[in-house]
Image (cartoon, rainbow, N blue to C red):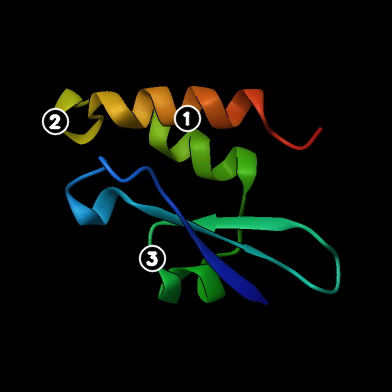
Amino acid sequence: MSTTLAHNPVCKPAHYQFYFGVSRRTATRYYATDKAALGRCRLTYMDFFRRYDAFPDPQFRPKWIETECAKMRQNAPK
């Protein structure tokens, strides 16, 4: 699986960056907050963003996550 770092340069702190990998076998994109988790968790697009949506505490949902998630939902592979 090839791994690409997908994050906005202004996205800090670093642990809020997210990665996606594309499975060569199925061409499915998987998302994770770090490269190690990418191999383990295999969260698909909607699972990943549902988890972000589940953070009720605003401290864990900085503004950039909300705008980034909105952008990615718009550009989601249908």
Contact between marks 1 and 3 (CB within 8 A): the answer is no
Q: Is residue 34 left or right of 47 when viewed as pictured? A: left
Name the residue at the front extreme.
Answer: 9
Residue bearing the label numbered 1: 69
Q: Is residue 14 left or right of 8 when viewed as pictured? A: left
Q: Looking at the image, is mark 1 or mark 2 earlier in the sequence?
A: 2
Give amino acid for label 1.
Answer: Cys
Residue bearing the label numbered 2: 59
Give amino acid for label 2.
Answer: Gln
Q: Distance between the residues labelled 1 and 3?
A: 17 Å
Q: Looking at the image, is mark 1 or mark 3 earlier in the sequence?
A: 3
The image position of residue 28, as x and y in percent, is: 77, 57
- Mark number displayed over residue 34: 3
The image position of residue 24, as x and y in percent, is: 80, 73
Q: Nearer the viewer, mark 1 or mark 2?
A: 1
Q: Looking at the image, is mark 2 or mark 3 earlier in the sequence?
A: 3
Q: How far apart are marks 1 and 2 (CA)?
A: 16 Å
Query: In this orientation, which residue lies closer to the viewer: 67 or 44?
Result: 67
